[in-house]
Image (cartoon, rainbow, N blue to C red):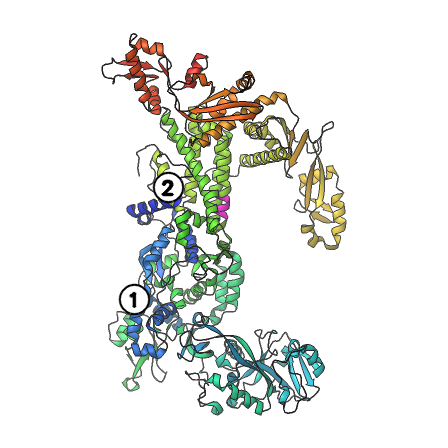
Amino acid sequence: MDCNLQAMDDVCEGTSISFPEQEEKILKWWTEVKAFETQLEKTKHLPEYIFYDGPPFATGLPHYGHILAGTIKDIVTRYQTMTGHHVTRRFGWDCHGLPVEHEIDMKLGIKSREDVIKMGIGNYNEECRSIVTRYVGEWEKVITRTGRWIDFKNDYKTMDLNFMESVWWVFSQLYNKNLVYRGFKVMPYSTGCKTPLSNFEANSNYKEVLDPEIMVAFPIVGDEDGAAFVAWTTTPWTLPSNLALCVNSNFVYVKVKGKSDGKIYIVAESRLSELPVEKGKKGVQNGHVDPTTKGPKAKNSMVAYQVLDKFPGSSLVGKKYVPLFDYFKELSDVAFRVVADDYVTSDSGTGIVHCAPAFGEDDYRVCMENQIINKGENLVMTVDDDGCFTDKITDFSGRYVKEADKDIIQAVKEKGRLVKSGKFTHSYPFCWRSDTPLIYRAVPSWFVAVEKLKSQLLENNEKTKWVPAFVKEKRFHNWLENARDWAISRSRFWGTPLPIWMSEDGVDIQVIGSVEQLETLSGIKVTDLHRHKIDHITIPSPRGPEFGVLHRVEDVFDCWFESGSMPYAYIHYPFENQDFFHKNFPGHFVAEGLDQTRGWFYTLMVLSTALFGKPAFRNLICNGLVLAEDGKKMSKRLKNYPSPMEVIDAYGADALRLYIINSPVVRAEPLHFKKDGVYGVVKDVLLPWYNAYKFLVENANRLEMEGLAPFVPLDRVTLVNSPNVLDQWINSATQSLVHFVRQEMDAYRLYTVVSYLLKFIDNLTNIYVRFNRKRLKGRTGENDCTTALSTLYHVLLTVCKVMAPFTPFFTEVLYHNMRKVAVGSEESIHFCGFPQVEGKGGSRMEESVDRMMKIIDLARNVRERHNKSLKTPLREMIVVHPDAEFLDDIAGKLKEYVLEEVNVKSVVTCNDPLMYACLRAEPDFSVLGKRLGKSMRVVAEAVKAMSQEEILSFEKAGEITIATHSLKPTDIKIVRRFKCPDGLTEEQMDASGDGDVLVILNLCPDDSLLEAGFAREVVSRIQKLRKTSLLKPSDTVEVYFKSLDQDTSVSTQMLKSQEVYIKDAIGSLLLDPSLAPEHAVIIGEETYRNISNCDFQITLSRPTLVFNDNAILELYTGNAKHAGALKVYLLSRDHSKLKSEFRLGNRKIKVDCIETLPDVDVVLGEHVFLTVGDYYSAITNHNP
């Protein structure tokens, strides 16, 4: 702690400050003093706050999504540190999986699995390892530049041995709990590369292709009419593997008879129009039609078919049908029947879907749910790795499936089962590597039995807090409600290998949970768990040597399993940190994007529930997507968004942080990113905040410049007792700010803070600073000035501490300077605690000031309506309100501010709402309409008929009963219409109200107010001239007024009568130009015409010394040369330092430094005057 006090450094104008440059300086300083490391050291004795950082891939550069999530995480963890916690923040990297393999495949031209085997898994994996950290440096640069404090040196990587070992432990625990089994998962499959693809890969190469579409008849077993189900498919090659037909229970189905051929079909009623219309041509079997035929399908179908019956889809469930082929006749007892599921839609096909479980995700699920196939059992595959039919499909064995489509359609036709055929063009996925069409195919996989955990998952979800809540209650809840078993294995190379060793006959299975266990069982030292380091390791069979050895299964983990294991693996649990983990689990906080509800959030919840029966986290913030300004996805190719560093370099990271967290994206809604929005934060938040700080610094430093004691802020206890009403108000408002931000941050509602801060900064600058300028500039006395400056200092310091988590750079800049005048301050604002709520916020004074500002706005509305400039004084304002305490404040403590802002001579209060207004009640139809229904008309009429007294009674009671309905203030609008007093028109007296308060202005002209109006015009011109002369508010000048009228007495007299007001407004007297000495330095001059019918000139000069020539001559006994030398010396001195010396010397200084001149004592006010104003006051008997 630094106890040495010094003056705050001067600061530049708001127009000159570069926020990005200031941030770069702070970044450099943070690095020099090791600010983050120091903060962690200072808080290490405090309770832990556990934050889990989801690991991104380092194979790409950070984008706005990463910056958004990182900003949310940084704000929360900084806040938690300031509120008394130790928050370890370690960055994590997702090192395994498809993105890395994809990069290497592109680099090395790898097209198939065989290419990797040929190259060698070891060589391939080392290539993968070599690029994992390629962009780590760039990530660290960008993330650090955004102001985020996180440990990159002590990061965790999913490819590290310790992390991978913990993943093995997690899996072994699940296996021991009987939550792991081997089954099948239907995935996009590349026959060209002989490998399944992820959805990411499958979606990367679509082409327009022409494919067949056919309708096939499936005769119903035992149907008395000989009817057949009609199913539609675009993949004829899957028909040999058909095991079921699926309908939708909620659809209506019809049994129809063809009028021309007598064939009877069952289809969904809504899809009847898709059945073929017999053309009556010879040789066309089963209604085969030309797919290009056009016409009113529905009408033709209704004519061509007779409806025999209608029934719900649910009535068809269980009906058996005749298989199309007999390749699966061994399953006849359980297969070839109708099942139902909602995935059947009415927007295509016939409302009946053929199911081949090995070739469709929904097909597989539906067949398993209906026990046509069973979970964990081997699924008979009819298509091999090359995409060719196996020997089981005897008629098409060895044929590539897509090429066999034509022959399969012919076979269906020959069986008399083809109802309709045709072709259609659609977008179809191709393998991005081999450029061959993809198929969906069941592949073997290891599963976590999530469905067993469903009730526990739902229960644990209820124990967590999500922001926004609807993501938890709807999206995530529904995802858990419909959770399916999780396929966790991938047939890949670069990943954490599954720790499963199995005998060739599948009898012996050994799941390994640690490196030590593997070393013990195999007798081999293990230093790396990647495939090429352990695939060769075998384990002896527990049944004896004659049963051979166990080999590891080839699969690796899905990288989501690794990231879901992060809470344990990043601290190498359970091999290390057991006490730490058990004391701090579940973690306190996670934050990522909306897409993670089905990703990381889900895997965290599944694994923690399976392992410990708990959720992995307690609090979660879910953000939406950051889109380009046009609402499209941000695209490097389209260049439809500015790069993050471009925005930061232009406006600073703090502005970007505030922009994104003050947007819908923190409520899980999309943000259309606008660069102008970031600039808006600079303009509306940072610059006004900076200007309030600059005003403080300038006026605090002015004290010393004027020879007063250096500024040292008074203590908070003293300031709480300030008698000034605006001090009381801003202190209360500051406590309300602290309370609000604490409340919102404790509830993780980050998005509410910026709008509240915006309003607070606006109030601070436009009410406290603006209304208190005289006090802050010292025009009401030194003590009052110190109180006002101290109040502003503590408010700004508190705001900086409150906002430090949000704007870490800007608050540090301000704090660095402000701490110089504070005893015992921390070196960095980020070492400070978060402000405590002291005293009460939300006081009556806050409400009164809010209402006062409403009064001022309403009065300005009246002025604007009548073209009455604010510079034109008005005689009277009447404020009408029923609250006597508020009226007392307006007529008492707040009166001076109201008079000045509204520019009226008097304020009159009135608590009789009927004296100046007529009241009218109107029902709020938007609120009452739905609630009252048919009673609305009766209630509306009664409300409109309410008398003045009834309305007043209703306002007082807050409730009224009409026609048995209880109505509240939210149900009825009270309209106040101004009632002009008798004998006056609205041109003479008018009003404006907001439903709460009514403001009335007397607009009658009054000659006695002309002088005050002219004085305001002059003051306004002086202030504008100061600005054009580039003066700071704290710069002291002398102001000269020269009338250019023929009759100069008119303006002179008016200004004479307003002398007190002018001196209060500009801080000095208006001077006659004849008083200006020759050595006066002119810094601004302007001539004005026809201002209140007067012409005049305003001149500004630097404060100028005025000498008493006779008195100075006497100092040197009449030696004019010596007297001249003294004047030259005094004029050469810095004016502010000279002023300070006179103050310290009790208005006297000794001049003993002029060579050949005797020492003399120069007395202020006797030999010299510091300003022309002081001289003028002295000669006119004014008090200087």
What's drawn in magenta, residue-wise? Answer: 752-757
Question: In front here: 1164 or 246?
Answer: 1164
Mark 1 element type: helix
In the depicted structure, whether residue 424 falls above or below residue 853: below
Residue 948 percent location from the top left of the image: 73, 37
Give the mark nearest the N terminus, 1 or 2.
1
- Say if residue 717 shows up in the picture: no
Mark 2 element type: helix
Which residue is disc 2 drawn over? 813
In the depicted structure, whether residue 95 falls above or below residue 1122: below
Residue 463 percent location from the top left of the image: 48, 59
> Taking 233 as reference, is 153 left or right?
left
Single out the residue that lies furthest toward the top: 1117
How would you rate the neighbour count of disc 2 (Cα within 10 Å): few for under 14, some for 14-19, many for 20 or more?
A: some
Q: Quadrant of the N terminus?
A: top left
Amino acid type of the residue that numbered disc 2 sits on in the rendered structure: Val
Which residue is disc 1 drawn over? 130
Question: In front here: 1177 or 347?
Answer: 1177
Residue 159 percent location from the top left of the image: 32, 66
